[in-house]
Image (spheres, rainbow, N blue to C red):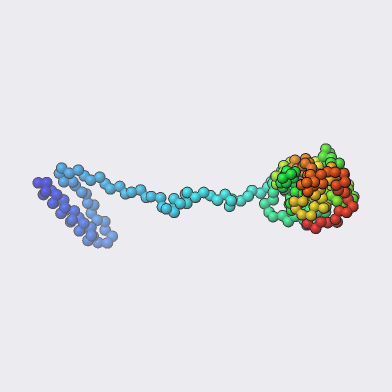
């Protein structure tokens, strides 16, 4: 009896596939239900395997985003002093520093540099060393280096409307002071800052310790330590340098 039922089921299945194969186009084949023979357990329906993650997708998921391609945020205005805007950081656009250290500019960049002897000091956007003068004052800000003195120690001037972009310096301590001739000089923590005309190239600190009153300025407006003669400095002796006289009209850097 069991063999007869199996035979009948096979014949029914064959007939059903034959009908489905011959069905005219556009018609739905008759539904076929499978009945297990007596004493047999119905087979569990086949479950299609879950699609695996495509190799390309898995590789992309494992990749880390390239943060270097993310845009650098623009600096914001951190402080305003009349017609000068002082920004929170370096400019997001390239700025060409002025060639002359005597004419001033509407846009001033301030950076920092390292020296193994004097430590961290402030430079302009071209890497030229900036100094402070002990005979000036910062409370209130006052520049006393004028006339022949300013020929040897040109002030860092800013013109209207001015912008200052610092890097490594707190923008809140930056500003300017009006000089005796009506020009405006950049200040760090109230101290007016200057170049030294005998510095021939970026990185030179030939003005360090001159007459014991001139020092490269640090990012907080303080003076850096005197550079000893053994390290190429003046040692801060009284006859180590002259405030004017033979200073070049413009070092041309």
Q: Position of residue 62 (x, y in %)?
A: 47, 49
Tell me if 101 is positioned left or right of 26 in this view: right
Quadrant in the picture for residue 25: bottom left
Q: Which residue lies furthest to the front in this view?
A: 230
Identify which residue is drawn at 30% across, 47% down. 47
Tell me if 66 is positioned left or right of 16 in this view: right
**Front-most of 18 and 93?**
93
Quadrant in the picture for residue 22: bottom left
Tell me if 38 is positioned left or right of 51 in this view: left
Query: Which image quarter holds the C terminus?
Result: bottom right
Identify which residue is drawn at 74% across, 44% down. 117
**Front-most of 74 and 156?**
156
Above or below, 100 against 37 in this view is below
Identify which residue is drawn at 79% across, 53% down. 105
**Front-most of 105 and 232?**
232
Q: Position of residue 26 (x, y in %)?
A: 28, 60
Q: Where is residue 135 in the image (x, y as percent from the top left)?
A: 86, 41
Residue 187 visible somewhere in the drawing: no
Q: Where is residue 102 in the image (x, y as percent from the top left)?
A: 83, 54
Identify which residue is drawn at 28% across, 48% down. 46
């Amino acid at each position: 009896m069991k063999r007869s039922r199996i035979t009948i089921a096979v014949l029914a299945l064959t007939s059903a596939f034959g009908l489905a194969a011959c069905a005219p186009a556009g018609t739905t084949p008759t539904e076929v239900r499978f009945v297990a023979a007596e004493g047999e357990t119905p087979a569990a329906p086949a479950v299609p395997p879950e699609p695996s993650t495509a190799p390309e997708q898995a590789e992309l998921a494992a990749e880390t985003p390239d943060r270097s391609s993310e845009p650098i945020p623009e600096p914001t205005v951190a402080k305003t002093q009349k017609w000068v805007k002082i920004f929170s950081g370096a400019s997001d656009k390239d700025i060409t520093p002025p060639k002359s250290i005597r004419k001033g500019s509407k846009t001033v960049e301030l950076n920092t540099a390292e020296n193994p002897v004097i430590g961290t000091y402030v430079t302009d956007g071209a890497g030229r060393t900036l100094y402070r003068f002990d005979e000036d004052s910062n409370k209130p800000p006052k520049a006393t280096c004028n006339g022949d003195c300013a020929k040897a120690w040109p002030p860092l001037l800013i013109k209207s409307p001015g912008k200052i972009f610092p890097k490594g310096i707190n923008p809140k301590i930056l500003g300017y002071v009006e000089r005796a001739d009506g020009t405006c000089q950049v200040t760090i923590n109230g101290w007016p800052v200057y170049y030294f005309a005998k510095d021939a190239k970026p990185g030179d600190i030939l003005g360090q310790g001159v007459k014991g009153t001139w020092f490269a300025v640090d990012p907080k407006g303080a003076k850096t330590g005197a550079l000893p003669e053994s390290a190429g400095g003046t040692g801060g002796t009284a006859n180590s340098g002259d405030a004017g006289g033979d200073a070049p009209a413009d070092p041309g850097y």
